[in-house]
Image (spheres, rainbow, N blue to C red):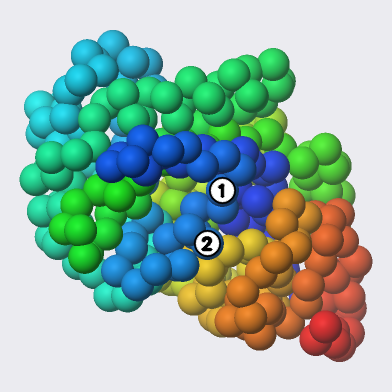
Amino acid sequence: MKVAIVFDSAGTLLYTYRVAVDVRSKKMKKGVESTMLTCSEKGRSLILLYAHSLNIFETPSDTLLSDYMKKEGIKFGIACSNGIVSHEEVSEYLLNDRYARISDLQICIKTVWNCCKKLPIVAMNSGVIVNRDLKGIEFTITSGGRPFSNAKETISSLHKMGVATYVASGDSTDKLVKMADYLGIPHDNIHGVATPSIKAQVIKDLKSVYDCVIMVGDGINDIPALREADIAVLTCQQNKNKPKKLIETADIIINDVSEIKNITENAIKGGNFKKY
């Protein structure tokens, strides 16, 4: 039996530390889970900004983030949203916002970097949370992650079993490639800038090639892909506090990425798996 496994990145292959700043109150939230923060209030959308951290730090701190995006032509991706939102609507919020400044993003990046800079492998991403009710940016947010200690060995074991491994994540492709090089996942199997619908499409496309496609995710934005997969695996390795909707979507819940090896062996043998 030909088996493929698609992994999300943050919280699934990477232990991730996140910091958010409320752009109006300037209060910082440390250790947040971005998808949970987004989905805790109707009208919020998590947006990944495709901007380099160094370029952000070279920009004057009092610059409006909206002006920076327009000047630099910064592109963005919608990672997840609490409610339906269009790309055009998000673009309007981002480019017309008058509250968020570069300093709000700089402090997020600096805080995460100070926490993660001594790690051998670090993947950092920055973005914002826009709010439809506010018609603008509510939070700036940065995440930094390192591979779980057993992730590399798990990927190696899967490859020895003849299993194809993929990554589908909202993170930028260049950052995912660095992680993939460390873990041993082929570049061609990396799907960056992947919205929830794109993740689901990746699963659907792979199902036409493989006998069994397993999706491993940890957040609300993974639900469409989990539903599309032959086997939906929810990992709680970083955070065990998951929404009921996410738990109900999963066929199997794991607490360590290495557990995927036994699940895969069972799938290859054509065995049954129980939902728990």
- Horizontal side of residue 135 vs 80, given as left or right: left
Q: Residue type at mark 2?
A: Met
Q: What percent of the width, then of the height, locates residue 201? A: 43, 71
Name the residue: 68% across, 78% down.
247
Residue 261 % position (x, y): 86, 61
Secondary structure of the residue carrying tag 1 is loop
User: Which residue, given by chain and number where applicable, does mark 1 sit on?
Assistant: 32
Q: Determine whether 108 is above or below 87 in the image.
A: above
Quarter placement of the C terminus: bottom right
Q: Is residue 217 left or right of residue 260?
A: left
Residue 194 vertical placement versus 184 (above, below) = below
Label 1: how many residues lie within 10 Å, few (<14), some (14-19) or many (20+)?
A: some
**Image location (x, y in percent) of residue 26:** 36, 35
The image shows residue 215, relative to residue 14, as above or below, that is below
Q: Is residue 227 visible?
A: yes
Task: Determine contact: label 2, label 1, CB under 8 Å.
Answer: yes
Residue at 35% over, 72% down: 42
Three-letter code for the amino acid on which mark 1 is drawn: Val
Question: Horizontally, is 213 left or right of 26 in the view?
Answer: right
**Viewed as shown, does residue 112 lie left or right of 238?**
left
Q: Which of 218 and 106 is in front in this view?
A: 106
Number of numbered discs overlaid on the protein picture: 2
* Residue appearing at x 65%, y 51% in the figure: 11
Judge whether 32 appears above or below 41 on screen. Answer: above
Q: Is 22 in front, or is 105? A: 22
Identify the image quadrant of the N terminus: bottom right
Residue position marked by numbered label 2 in the rendering: 36
The part of the image, by quadrant, that contains residue 172 is top left
